[in-house]
Image (cartoon, rainbow, N blue to C red):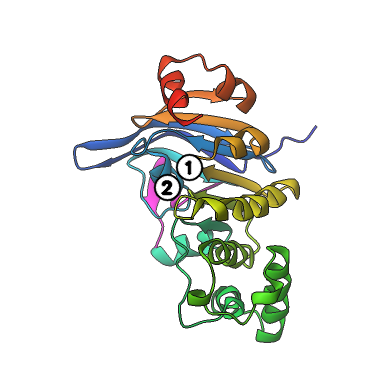
Amino acid sequence: MTEVTPMVEAQQVSKSYGSNQVLKSISLTVMPGEVLCLVGPSGSGKSTFLRCINHLERVNAGRLAVDGKLVGYREANGKLYELHPKEAALQRRDIGMVFQRFNLFPHMTALENVMEAPVRVKGVGRAQAKQRARELLERVGLGERTDYYPAHLSGGQQQRVAIARALAMDPKLMLFDEPTSALDPELVGEVLDVMKELARTGMTMIVVTHEMGFAREVADEVVFMDGGVVVESGDPKVVLTNPQHERTKAFLSKVL
C-alpha cells in the first residue's frame, strides 16, 4: 500500500514573541480530506499556530510541512534556511485562509474581489476568472449578489465572499481563523453551512472556532489548546462530551 502524505504535519513547533512563548512544542497531523477544529480560550495560541502554517508567522523551533514540503524553509545539511519572501508567497498560493475580519477590497464588487487573485497571482485570463468567480459565488449562495460592493452586503455575506475568494485559488488546504466570531448571531449559520458543504466535498480544513456544535458535527478531530500546548485531542464526540483533562472540562463547562 502506498503511504498517504499528511496534508499538514507539525513537529514540536514553538513560537515566541520576546520572552512570551505562545506555542510550546505543538505536534499534530492532518491527513488529506480531514477537518481539524482547534478550540480553547483566547490567547491559547490557536490563531498563531494557524498563521505559522502558511508562514505569516515564523516558527522559532520545530518544523511544519504542508503536503510533504516544509513551509517557509528549505533544509540543507540538517539545517533550516528561511525561503525568500517570494518563494514563501508561492507556497502560500496553495493554502486558502479566511480571517475573522473579511478583508475584502471595498472598491471592488463581490465578483471582482473573487477574480482578483487568480488574475493577478496566477495569470488566469479575465474571462475564465470571471466565470469561475460566478460559479464560486453561486456555490456560497451569493449568485444574486455578484455586483454588490462589500458595504452593501451583510457580515455573513461578506464572509461568504471571502470564502469564495480563497477557493478561487484552488487551494489544497483551507485555514479558518474564527470565521464567525465577528458576525451577528443570526448570520453565523449561513457561513457554517458553507463550511459544512466544503467539508462534505473533501476539502482539508483547519478551523479555529468557538462553535462547538460545528466542531462536533464536522470535525474528524478536535484539539483543545491552552497556554500554548495541546492539552487534549481526539474524536470530537469524546473530547467534547467526555473530556479527560480537568482544564478541558473547565473550559467546556463555560462554553457548552
- Local packing at callout 1 (Cα closer than 10 Å; few below 14, some 14-19, many 20+) is many
The vertical placement of 29 against 49, above or below, is above
Circle 2 SS class: helix
**In which quadrant of the rendered image does the N terminus lie?**
top right
Relative depth, front residue between 113 and 202? 113
* Displayed quadrant of residue 117: bottom right
Q: Position of residue 141 (x, y in %)?
A: 70, 65
Specify which label sits upstream in the sequence, 2 or 1: 2
Q: Are marks 2 and 1 in contact (CB under 8 Å)?
A: yes
The percent position of residue 167, horizontal first and vertical second, equals 63, 63
What stretch of residues is rendered in magenta?
69-84
Frontmost of labels 2 and 1 is 2
Percent position of residue 138, x then y: 72, 69
- Mark 1, residue position: 64
Tell me if residue 181 is in the magenta stretch. Answer: no
The number of numbered badges drawn on the structure is 2
Name the spot of residue 118 as percent of width and height, x first: 60, 74
From the viewer's perspective, tell me whether residue 17 is left or right of residue 250: left
Q: Is residue 186 above or below residue 63?
A: below
Residue under the image location 61 percent in, 27 percent down:
236
75 is within the stretch colored magenta: yes
Q: Residue at x 55, y 38 (%)?
A: 37
Q: Going 43% across and 30% down the picture, which residue do you hit?
A: 225
Which residue is found at the position 42% from the left and 15% from the top? Answer: 246
- Say if 233 sits above or below 193 in the image: above
The residue under label 2 is 52
Amino acid on which the number 1 mark rests in the picture: Leu
Residue 234 visible in the current orientation: yes
> Which residue is situated farthest in the left direction here?
19
Residue at the far front: name it.
Answer: 186
